[in-house]
Every structure is written in structure tokens, then in C-alpha cells.
Amino acid sequence: MSLKSNLLLLFVFGMTTLISAQTFHGPETEMAIIKKNIASFSQFYINGETDKLTNCYTTDGKIFPNGTDIIAGHAAIKKKWTLPEGVKILRHKITPEEIRIVDNYAYDYGYYAGATLRRNGSESSWQGKYVIVWKKIKEDWKIYLDIWNDISAPRAAPATVKPSAPAAVQNHPEYTSVQAAIEDYVFGLYLVDAQRIANSVDTTLHKTGFWFNKETMTYVDNLKMSYTQLYDLAGKWNKNGDQVTAMSPSEITIFDIQDKTASAKLVAAWGMDYFHLAKVDGQWKIRNVLWQSLPSEK
């Protein structure tokens, strides 16, 4: 079967199953290799192992980054993935929505998310969607075509800070770090990434809230949650992709930042969270959360 025919079959099959979450079609042994290679790709990127990362592609592989021409071949791909000095990838996770194998080709599409440590010590979080065409090379599977583009968050609106925040807060040197901690909190749940909860929430967390029951039209009060419960919840709450949509909010307002403490508010799919944060061993952590269902749900 020709490459053109293979790719046509791949995308025709893909259109018929686009709405399925985490759908895998193909021999289990071959699927296991692709899944392992997906995980390895992320680990190579985090470790800065550029040679191993480049070797994930076929020798005639091509990548399609945002805003650039097509990049082809190992030498050019390696140059693209080589990070500037002083820059490090802190996290990288690929979440396939569907993988389908057809003969010696396969396609894989889904979402990715991660974070970069900049030269100045600040952290930048990012998310996006991707499509990969895999090619079987001997007994291994390698990336032939790799297409991606950034979005604010899979199935979620971007995290924003209200412009009404005091200028002194927006100009505070810890502003981006406090915001990054809250982004990790919300996107840890949205993106099914419990590690982001570990990065942003203190193990002494005290969280309590008020959930509005639409059937009884009353609030259920004092719903408590520990750090462990929140961490476990992040690993499963949106696992099927049915808890958030493209319209789900992730709006952050930071009220105040001091040298060791900060306060902020988050509007998310589940409601409104009010935070107390503390700087612990040089890192901002969420210690207290008081939340309630969104008023629009009443």
C-alpha cells in the first residue's frame, strides 16, 4: 500500500472517531511500542537529551512548528529541539486522544502540556494540540510527521489576571511566580496532571467549600479536601475529557503579594476558589482554599 493511500485511510478513519476520548486501534504489541515512545519523547525533552529526542524521528522526518516553514531531516530537527543555554524543560506530558495503526503507518492526535524554566528563573507554562504520523522502521515506530500548535489549555479558556488588579501587585517581582502556582493548580485538574498539584500545593493544604445542589436548591456546606485527596482527584477528574470545554473559565485575580504571603482568586469550571499562598523554601505554595459553586449554577 502506498504512503498516500495509507495516510488517506488514516485520516478517513480518524474523522469517524474524532469524538472518542483515548481510543486506540491496532495490535497491542505495536500499540505498546508507540505509547512507550510517546513517554520516552517527553522524558528525553525534560532531560535535555537532544540526540535521543532527534532519534525519535525517521531520518526523513518532518516537523511543523508554529509560525515557521516545514523543518525536515535529523540535523534541522535537532537544531530546533536544542534549547538555549540556561533554559530547561521542567515538565512535558503528551495525552493522546486517539492512536490508530494501519499497516506500517499510524496516526496519533491529542494534547500536550508542559513548563519551561527561563534564564531569569521564572517559569512559563504552555499547552497545545498535535497530530503525529508514525512510520514503522524495522521493529520500532518512529515519528514521520509531527504537527502541533499552542493553545491556552486543552478544552479550557486561558488563565487570565483581571486588569483591575492593583498596579503594585502586577509590578511585584513575585507576580509571575504566584500566578504560575495558581495556573498549575487549575491546569493540573483540567489537564489530568497531578504533578502540577504537587508543584503548587503545600502538603498542609486546608481546603473547604460549598457546593450548590441543583436538585434540592440548597448548598452542601463545609466540604473538606486534603492535599492527598486533591492530588488523587487531579489524576482522574477530567480523565475522560468531559469536565471542561473550550468555554470553561480559568481566570486568575491576584489581590496582594508580600515577601512570604499572597492572596488570590480563581474562577474555574467547578466554581470560585479563594487562595492563601505562602513562599515555602523559595517556592510559592497554596496553603488555604475556600471555594463555592459558581453563582450562575444557582
Image (cartoon, grey):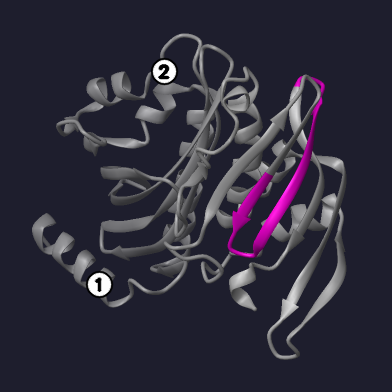
User: N-terminal of the two: label 2 or label 1?
Assistant: 1
Camera-nearest residue between 146 and 187: 187
Residue 225 position in % (x across, y down): 85, 59
Q: Report if residue 93 is visible in the image.
A: no
Residue density around tag 2, few if under 14, some if 14–19, many if 20 or more, within 10 Å: some
Camera-nearest residue between 42 and 134: 42
> Residue at image x 48%, y 29%?
45
Q: Which residues are magenta?
A: 265-282
> Residue at image x 64%, y 50%?
266
Residue 43, compared with residue 23, is above or below; it is above
Question: Of the numbered discs in the image, which one, if any, rests on residue 71?
Answer: none
Q: Secondary structure at mark 1?
A: helix
Residue 175 position in % (x across, y down): 61, 26
Seen as rendered, the residue at the extreme top is 85
Residue 143 position in % (x across, y down): 31, 43
How many discs mark residues in the rendered view? 2
Q: Quadrant of residue 99?
A: bottom left
Name the amino acid type tagged 2. Answer: Leu
* Residue on which the image places disc 2: 83
Residue 4, compared with residue 39, is above or below; it is below
Residue density around tag 1, few if under 14, some if 14–19, many if 20 or more, within 10 Å: few
The overriding secondary structure of the stretch rendered in magenta is: strand
* Residue on which the image places disc 1: 15
Name the amino acid type tagged 1. Answer: Met
Q: Quadrant of residue 272?
A: bottom right
- Is residue 190 within the magenta segment? no
Q: Is residue 201 left or right of residue 138?
A: right
Camera-nearest residue between 106 and 140: 106
Camera-nearest residue between 205 and 7: 205
Q: Is residue 111 left or right of residue 207?
A: left
Q: Are marks 2 and 1 in contact (CB under 8 Å)?
A: no
> Residue at image x 35%, y 57%?
109
